[in-house]
Amino acid sequence: MKFNHVDIPTTDRFEGEIPLPDLAMTVSDHKNNPFGIQWQRYDDGAPYPDLVKTVAHVAFEVQDLATALLGQKVIIEPNDPIPGLTVAFIEVNGAPVELMQIDREVCQEDIEGL
C-alpha cells in the first residue's frame, strides 16, 4: 500500500472548494499541500455510511483492490467515481479506510480532486 491522502469531513465551507455533484460532495485539492490533507463536505442525503461522513479517513493506493479487500469489513463496495479509478472503503478498528486502485494510463490528472 502507498499513502495517497487523508480526508477530514466537515459541515463548514472551506477554501478551494471543488464541487463533485455526481458524488454528492464537495472536496478540497489534497495535492495543494505536502501532507495530502483534503477537506470533504457531504451533500444532504449523500449515500455514504455515517462513519465515512463523520470520521476522518486515510486513503491508500493498492495494486489489486480485490485482493486488498479479502477478509476486510467492506463498508462501501468497490465503485468507479471516474474512469481509471476504483475505490472501496473498509472499517478498521472503528475507522474508515479508503483503498484505491488507479490505472494511471486511463486516470492521470483526473484524480486531482479525489
Image (tube, rainbow, N blue to C red):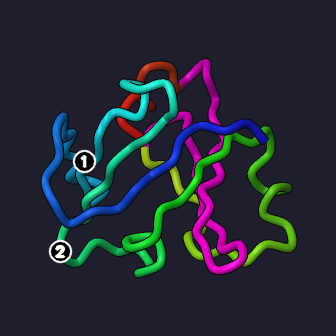
Where is residue 51 shown, x and y percent of the image?
47, 78
Count neighbours of disc 1 (C-alpha within 10 A) and say few if under 14, some if 14 to 19, many if 20 or more.
Answer: some
- Judged from this view, the residue extending furthest toward the left is 13
Does label 1 or label 2 sit earlier along the sequence?
A: 1
Picture layout, residue 3 above or below residue 87: above
Q: Which label was assigned to residue 20? A: 1
On whether residue 85 falls in the magenta region, the answer is yes
Magenta span: 82-106
Q: Amino acid at mark 1?
A: Leu
Q: Which residue is painted at 19% across and 45% down in the image? A: 19
Left or right: 90 with respect to 8? right
Q: Amino acid at mark 2?
A: Asp
Q: CA distance from mark 1 to mark 2?
A: 13 Å
Where is residue 8 shown, x and y percent of the image?
40, 56
Where is residue 82 shown, x and y percent of the image?
43, 40
- Residue ID for mark 2: 44
Q: Quadrant of residue 11?
A: bottom left
Q: Which residue is painted at 67% across and 38% down in the image? A: 3
